[in-house]
């Protein structure tokens, strides 16, 4: 426990010292190897994997049968406390309904078609096979196509972007996007690192290399949740190559807000330690950030249950979709999930984690971000000249404020009546906002 105290204290201190120290951009190894050592030795295999190969998902009958069995044959759930709704987490009385739907009504053929509706590929980067959607639209003469790297977060996946893709790839006032949408390493169908250290900064290097492989030295970046954190690293490490950074949240935390977030986790330990946990006295933030602390410290233990039980996985993930969308959803017996999303939309996203068995490796991103090594790079304290545009969803739990020292070239903000999962909730509004932002980036750069 003492070790965590020190770690979190240092985290707070390093953020508190702020951007003012004007550090220089760290030099990260651009070829750092994250895959198994055997692969590095096997030149023939590696050469093949370094080719861009088309890829699609196959859901076998065996996998479907196994999933159905696990969904229907589980320990009974603890009955929910009277009137507790979603305040203690996902309401257990609601879970049978989800298990029944998933096992008996969810259409696996449709799911496979939906998850394969856009062209997908794999290519090996630094030892890891990276999965990505890639669409370069055919456009009439006079339309300019620009590359856009789109990075998802947790517990999201490339599925988040599905409904925005048709809008982004259709010309709008002379502009269209070539979209490149990878699964983060360790998430979904991208390989996970085999050794510690692949944090958001190192992922930025992986994605820079991915874009290079696809023929793009310079490109735009869009990021949501962890994708926004990785976007910040890209915009800081490669200031001459990132043409603009559009983020949907968490991107421009002021130092003060970031301290509050860290403190929430810190106070949680203190309070539990001192046996003085007083719910009324703790902040909402504290109540909702326990997962972050767990995933940043013991992802592998938490991951055992989540990767073994599909309904456990579903509850852990969808509780976030409930509360992070509208905090008052905690007061609804069904968590309000179906007021904002469809069951299929939510389960498709859970399926990405279930089929790839990637929840444990995905959660490790929290541990890598809060590590001493990641913090020592000091990337969050280095200003970047890359122009930035931010969406602020008004129901977002974590506060976000513009940090003009980190991002002096801030070109715009959009306030959106949405929660954390903006791409699931309002795909059209976000896609239109990206056009607006990139047009602003282009005129900013001309100017
Ligand atoms: C399942 O989805 C497939 C593909 O969309 C469709 O052809 C089929 O009719 C659906 N099955 C049921 C039972 O609805
Ligand atoms: C918890 O905190 C609230 C607000 O500070 C206070 O009114 C209440 O008495 C505390 N409860 C306990 C059990 O300490």
Image (tube, grey):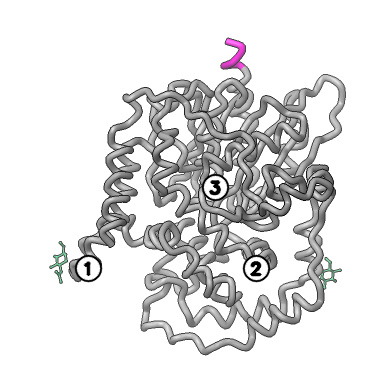
Seen in the image, is 347 located left or right of residue 279? right
In this rendering, which labeled residue sits more in front, label 2 or label 3? 3
270 or 248: nearer the eye? 270
Which quarter of the figure has residue 353? bottom right
For the question of whether residue 149 can be seen, the reply is yes
Asked if residue 215 is positioned above or below residue 223 in the image, the reply reads: above
Q: Label 1: state its secondary structure.
A: loop
> Which residue is at a point 63% across and 40% down the rendered structure image?
206
Q: Label 2: state its secondary structure.
A: helix
Mark 3 lies on residue: 198
Q: Earlier in the sequence, mark 1 or mark 2?
A: 1
441 or 125: nearer the eye? 125
Which residues are drawn in magenta? 443-447
Label disc, if present, on residue 277 of the rendered structure:
1
Asked if residue 71 is positioned above or below residue 283 in the image, the reply reads: below
Seen in the image, is 288 located left or right of residue 102? left
Q: CA distance from mark 2 to mark 3?
A: 22 Å
Asked if residue 5 is positioned above or below residue 106 in the image, the reply reads: above
Asked if residue 180 is positioned above or below residue 95 in the image, the reply reads: above
> Which residue is at a point 49% across and 61% down the rendered structure image?
320
| Picture quarter with ligand 2 | bottom left
Percent coordinates x, y for residue 247 in the rendering: 53, 37
Mark 2 lies on residue: 354
* Residue behind label 3 places its C-beta within 8 angstroms of ligand 1: no
Seen in the image, is 1 located left or right of residue 421? left
| Secondary structure mostly taken by the magenta-highlighted segment of the chain | helix
Percent coordinates x, y for residue 365 in the rendering: 51, 52
Disc 2 packing (10 Å; few <14; some 14–19; many ≥20): many
């Amino acid at each position: 426990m003492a070790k965590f105290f020190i770690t979190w204290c240092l985290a707070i201190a390093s953020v508190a010292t702020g951007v003012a120290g004007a550090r220089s951009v760290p030099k990260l190894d651009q070829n750092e190897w994250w895959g198994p050592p055997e692969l590095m030795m096997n030149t023939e295999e590696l050469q093949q994997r370094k080719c861009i190969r088309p890829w699609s998902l196959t859901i076998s009958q065996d996998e479907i049968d196994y999933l159905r069995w696990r969904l229907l044959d589980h320990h009974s759930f603890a009955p929910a406390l009277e009137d507790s709704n979603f305040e203690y987490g996902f309401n257990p009385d609601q879970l049978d309904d989800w298990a029944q739907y998933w096992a008996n009504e969810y259409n696996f053929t449709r799911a496979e078609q939906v998850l394969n509706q856009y062209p997908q590929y794999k290519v090996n980067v630094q030892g890891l096979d990276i999965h990505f959607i890639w669409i370069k639209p055919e456009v009439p003469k006079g339309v300019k196509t620009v590359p856009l790297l789109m990075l998802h977060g947790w517990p999201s996946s490339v599925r988040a972007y599905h409904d925005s893709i048709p809008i982004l790839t259709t010309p709008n006032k002379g502009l269209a996007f070539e979209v490149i949408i990878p699964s983060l390493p360790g998430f979904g169908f991208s390989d996970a690192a085999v050794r510690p250290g692949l944090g958001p900064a190192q992922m930025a290097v992986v994605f820079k290399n991915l874009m290079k492989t696809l023929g793009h030295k310079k490109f735009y970046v869009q990021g949501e949740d962890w994708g926004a954190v990785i976007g910040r690293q890209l915009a800081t490490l490669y200031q001459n190559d990132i043409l603009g950074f559009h983020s949907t949240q968490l991107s421009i935390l002021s130092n003060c807000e970031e301290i509050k977030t860290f403190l929430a986790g810190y106070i949680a330990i203190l309070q539990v330690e001192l046996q003085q946990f007083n719910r009324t006295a703790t902040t909402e933030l504290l109540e909702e950030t326990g997962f972050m602390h767990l995933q940043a410290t013991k992802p592998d233990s938490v991951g055992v249950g989540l990767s073994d039980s599909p309904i456990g996985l579903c509850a852990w993930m969808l509780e976030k979709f409930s509360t992070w969308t509208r905090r008052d959803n905690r007061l609804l017996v069904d968590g309000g999930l179906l007021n904002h999303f469809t069951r299929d939309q939510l389960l498709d996203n859970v399926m990405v984690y279930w089929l790839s068995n990637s929840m444990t490796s995905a959660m490790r991103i929290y541990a890598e971000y809060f590590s001493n090594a990641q913090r020592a790079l000091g990337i969050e304290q280095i200003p970047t000249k890359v122009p930035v545009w931010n969406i602020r969803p008004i129901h977002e739990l974590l506060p976000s404020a513009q940090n003009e020292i980190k991002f002096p070239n801030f070109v715009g903000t959009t306030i959106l009546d949405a929660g954390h999962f903006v791409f699931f909730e309002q795909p059209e509004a976000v896609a239109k906002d990206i056009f607006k932002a990139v047009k602003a980036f282009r005129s900013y750069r001309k100017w």
